[in-house]
Image (cartoon, grey):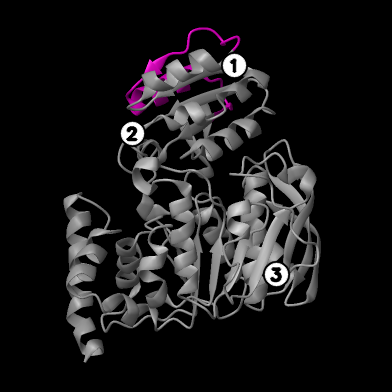
Amino acid sequence: MNQLLLIPIVAFAKLLTLALRVSGRGSGTALPGYVIGRYFPFVLESLVSQIPTVVAITGTNGKTTSQTMLSAILDQRPGAKVLRNKAGANLSQGILSELLKQSSPLGRLDFTHAVLEVEEATLPRIASLLKPSIIAVTNLYRDQLDAYGEIDHTEKLIRDGIAQCPTAAVVVNGDDPRTARLTQGLGNATYFISLAPEYARFLPYEGQLNLRDVNSQGLEATHIHINEDLTTDFAVQGQINHQAVHLPQAKTVSPGFFHVYNALTAIAIANLLGIDGATAVTGLQTFKPAFGRGEILVRHQGDKQVNYRLLLVKNPASFSLSLELLRNISALKLILAINDNTADSKDVSWLWDSELERLNQADIDWILCTGLRAKDMAVRLKYALDQPPGPIPTAESIREAIDLSFEKAGPGDTVFVLPTYTAMLEFRKLMGKTLDRV
């Protein structure tokens, strides 16, 4: 009976998505799922149950990048067809919207794998419906207090989600003390990913760095090197299902030590899905950064070209780690784009917990603040910088900031942009990029 009901429901969802796009009121990444989920709650389970293998990826930072990396690896497997909520719509309505979008008119899904980014508080609400064979948790940092509350609450939510899936294999960040303990007392097979201690000690975890047992199941990255173009080389060693894994050379185009964790997560999941290490390395070479996560946008005007590299910031950890990465850039040209919309966090006090002082070790050419809270960002810089590179202009209009930065930059220069989520979406739109093109 439910299968027959899917036909008119899917038709309605597709019409609603089309209407949103034609009217310019949205791209259908959330509203169709919200409406269908509210009035026909059985649809999510009916659709996702058609996909043989479901992987759920959650955590504070790195969900989208880990998902995109894993999808690139799975694309190397002949016959694999991967569904993912690639627009970053990771609430239940976003996941359902993607399932509805990809369904045939008869409500059928022809995919071998679903790789789903799941928001932390959403996992316990839908874990029993998704029935994932693998759950990955990237990290647990202090995030938007007005959305999640204290981090202890977020940790409990994720553990509750895992507990609903006793047969799921769990891949966790073994260096993060909070994620490393998530499955304690649960029966889930657990695989820990980590960086060699000389790299992991620089990561701002909540609590003391967890030292992974070398005999535990999982993977460790060694010989990490960030290249001048911000690509990252690393080696991998460890064991999955008591089989040795040794990859002497891997590379990711996403910059920074923290993205090596995402690559390790993708490699570990791929191994659990039966994909060998060499294929995983090849898949990573085809990976392109997810929107706003190291993505490069280009603006041309006459003979002048300026590159803009977007590094999304959403909490003190991501902000501080991106600033650490930029310390190695010569003549740094930097835009800080801070909004306080609901998806960014209305409370911008997190700016004061971010280690802007790391910019004192950077070779700064100029800084520009933009977004709804541009002035707040400028005040934070006033207290962080020992020697500011001259007056720091503010332009609440992101369009104005793009124009001003283009004037200030030289031909061929790269401007680094650290935006909050909605500022990133606006920046991309003004540069001619939309989620529908991702």
Magenta-drawn segment: 386-415
Crowd band around label 2 with a 10 angstrom C-alpha radius: few (<14), some (14–19), many (20+) = some
Q: Secondary structure at mark 3?
A: helix
Crowd band around label 3 with a 10 angstrom C-alpha radius: few (<14), some (14–19), many (20+) = some
Q: Amino acid at mark 1?
A: Asp
Residue assigned mark 1? 365
Please tell me whether residue 66 is drawn above or below residue 319 in the rendered image.
below
Residue 410 magenta: yes
Q: Quadrant of residue 321?
A: top right
Residue assigned mark 2? 340
**Residue 334, percent from left and from top:** 53, 24
Q: Nearer the viewer, residue 286 or 305?
A: 286
Please tell me whether residue 308 is drawn above or below residue 270 in the rendered image.
above
Query: Mark 1 vs mark 3: which is more N-terminal?
Result: 3
Crowd band around label 1 with a 10 angstrom C-alpha radius: few (<14), some (14–19), many (20+) = some
Estimate the spatial distance between the alpha carbons at disc 1 and disc 3, rounded to whole Å: 41 Å
